[in-house]
Image (tube, grey):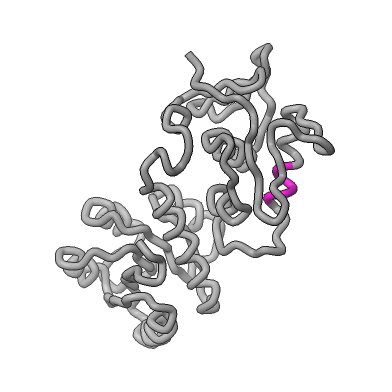
């Protein structure tokens, strides 16, 4: 799916905002559909198949969080919650209920477009056949061994040869996991950013580089001459160790 050919369905009772989004997103190459209520959205999902849904939480006939479950039963579309509720609890609940991202009103159209691109890119990457994403045996393995380490994807932990945890943060774990299952394949900073963080990628954001540095320290990979996680200058990073599914 080409990102600029995607169909976007907005669900918001703010007609003026709908006009602004339609004008901007159609200029960006998206097909734009709209609904002013939850009921109208559900009717549209009977006949249309959007790639992404922009869902307001405060609708005249339904609570947006309740609608998330209905959307999942009717559509494979990615969902970005677009809401005036800006507290952390609402964001966390929205993401836990199945939203792919959460954007707080008011927002700039450029940020909205960046969020849409990031979510669609993640969705497209997840839908690719396994051999395009890396070693299928690694991608399917619950536990992976490499260089004396055990990456346990069920426990979300990395253990050393003595069974002691390396105490990775969730972001560090996701980053290492992505590199390991794509062994000997370069992943760009933008790809790694999409995997581990929410929001649009900024080329000046050094978060990925900082996390890589922390991971190297925790797995004893010399940052001056790393053997496991190589820096591919101007591109991203590549895992170069020998990895295999654990028995």
Extreme-right residue of the structure: 224
Residue depicted at 52% across the width and 54% down the height: 89
Residue 39 percent location from the top left of the image: 21, 69
Between 129 and 157, the residue placed more toward the observer is 129
Q: In this rendering, would 156 be left or right of 217?
A: left
Q: Where in the figure is residue 243, as x and y percent of width and height?
A: 57, 25
Tell me where residue 36 sits by quadrant.
bottom left
Which quadrant: the N terminus?
bottom left
Q: Which residue is drawn at 64% across and 21% down?
A: 149
Residue 19 image point, x, y percent: 37, 87
- Name the dominant secondary structure of the magenta segment: helix
User: Could you tell me if residue 131 is visible in this image?
Assistant: yes
The number of numbered discs placed on residues in the rendered structure image is: 0
Look at the image and give the residue range highlighted in magenta: 208-212
Relative to 198, residue 60 above or below = below
- The quadrant in which residue 239 appears is top right
Q: Does the magenta segment cover residue 113?
A: no
| Camera-side residue of 33 and 97 | 33
Place residue 161 in its image quadrant: top right
Seen at 59% across and 56% down, the residue is 190
Q: Is residue 210 magenta?
A: yes
Q: Residue at x 21, y 72 (%)?
A: 40
Residue 234: where, in percent of width, then height?
70, 56
Whether residue 57 is visible = no
Q: In this view, does 85 lie above or below 12?
A: above
């Amino acid at each position: 799916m080409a990102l600029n050919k995607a169909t976007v369905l907005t669900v918001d009772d703010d007609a003026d905002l709908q006009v602004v989004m339609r004008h901007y997103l159609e200029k960006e190459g998206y097909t734009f559909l709209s609904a002013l209520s939850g009921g109208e959205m559900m009717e549209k999902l009977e006949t249309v198949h959007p790639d992404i849904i922009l869902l307001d939480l405060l609708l005249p006939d339904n609570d947006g969080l309740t609608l998330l479950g209905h959307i999942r039963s009717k559509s494979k579309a990615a969902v970005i919650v677009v809401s005036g509720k800006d507290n952390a609890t609402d964001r966390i609940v929205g993401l836990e209920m199945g939203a792919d991202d959460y954007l707080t009103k008011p927002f700039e159209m450029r940020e909205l477009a960046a969020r849409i691109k990031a979510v669609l890119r993640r969705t497209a990457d997840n839908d690719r056949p396994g051999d395009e994403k890396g070693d299928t045996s690694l991608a399917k393995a619950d536990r992976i061994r490499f260089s004396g380490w055990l990456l346990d994807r069920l426990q979300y932990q990395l253990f050393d040869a003595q069974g002691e945890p390396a105490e990775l943060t969730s972001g560090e774990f996701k980053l290492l996991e992505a590199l390991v299952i794509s062994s000997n394949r370069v992943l760009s900073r933008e790809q790694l950013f999409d995997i581990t963080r929410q929001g649009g990628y900024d080329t000046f954001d050094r978060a990925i580089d900082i996390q890589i540095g922390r991971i190297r320290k925790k797995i004893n990979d010399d940052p001056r001459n790393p053997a496991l996680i190589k820096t591919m200058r101007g591109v991203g990073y590549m895992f170069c160790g020998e990895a295999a599914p654990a028995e």
